[in-house]
Image (tube, helix red, strand yellow):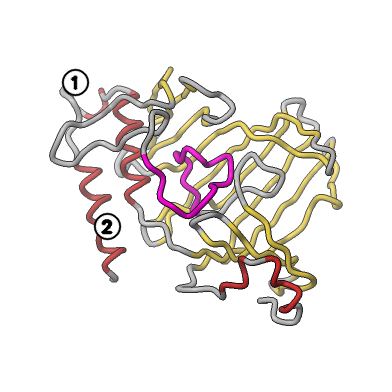
Amino acid sequence: MNAARAFATVAVALACAMPLPARGDADHSTGEQILARAKAVFRAHVRPPFVAYTLSRRDTHDGAPDFENSYTLKVWCRSSDRSALTRRAWRGIAYGSIENITVAFDGEVDPGPPTADIFERALFAPRPSAAPAVPGPTDSPLPVIGGVVVSTDYDYRVTASQREGATWHLTLEPKRDPDRNRLDDLWIDQATYEVTRVRLRDHLYLGFGGRSLEDEFEVRYTLRDGLPLIASIHGQTRDDEFETDYTFADVGFPASLPGWYFEPQLYGLHRDDGPS
């Protein structure tokens, strides 16, 4: 186990062990306290600098398959700014031209990567640089180990919390900017405080004219070596006219990737060097 993974393991364990303000046992915790602890656990995981994966998208329109907007991509992504090299894929093999995109939620490109931080302030817009974000008035501070536990969230208020089997279900409402703070529901494992499912507001972009429809995403997570990864997303427009299913597979974490992968102006020199 390397030092980063060891630190992440210890951090998650400490986050789970943090004391809650006295209100009886954990079953009587407030929604704000559950949200604070879930954020601490989620953000304690160390995200790898690079992630490679296969993204499959399947669309339907009025219940019929929409083949024009359905495809499979292989993606090689740099986590710091979500810059990604992509190629179309068929039966596990990448083919055709290479393209550079910035993967992000609520954008004209597909969401991702599977390691995305759903609590990040810039989740729904590409980050301008790889510099670490400095906590600001709209960023929720983490509870401090060994100090004061902060249980007030600056982005969301919890309007309802209930137990559903082995999970907490929190219903959220944005405190400030509903266009930026798009999380509506969280499902959190009661034992580990890992996020298992998310419901959020997104958009389905149609063509290149900028037209978009309100779209609701239901995101499902899986744990791999203790790291929460997006396994699938189901999107549905409000009028039920369009549905989209995304699945993330073959997820890997390369130690490094060639620098030209993230310099699209160099792609012309590497037409025969695209990864497969």
The amino acid pointed to by label 2 is Thr
Q: Residue 242 lies in what quarter of the image?
A: top right
| Residue 173 in sight here | no
Q: Mark 2 points at which residue?
A: 9
The quarter in which the N terminus is drawn is: bottom left
Farthest bottom residue in view: 272
Farthest left residue in view: 146
On the image, the x and y values in percent for residue 156 come to: 43, 25
Numbered disc 1: secondary structure: loop
Give the main secondary structure, helix, strand or loop, of the magenta stretch.
loop
Residue located 53% across and 42% down the image: 123
Residue 43 vs residue 197: left or right?
Answer: left
Judge by depth and name the residue closer to the eye, 108 or 194.
108
Residue 72 vs residue 23: left or right?
Answer: right
The amino acid pointed to by label 1 is Arg
What label does residue 23 carry, if any? 1
Dot 1: within a 10 Å radius of its alpha carbon, few (fewer than 14), some, or many (20 or more) residues? few
As for residue 120 lying within the magenta part, the answer is: yes
Q: Residue 225 lies in what quarter of the image?
A: bottom left
On the image, the x and y values in percent for residue 250 come to: 57, 66
Whether residues under marks 2 and 1 lie with C-beta atoms below 8 angstroms apart, the answer is: no
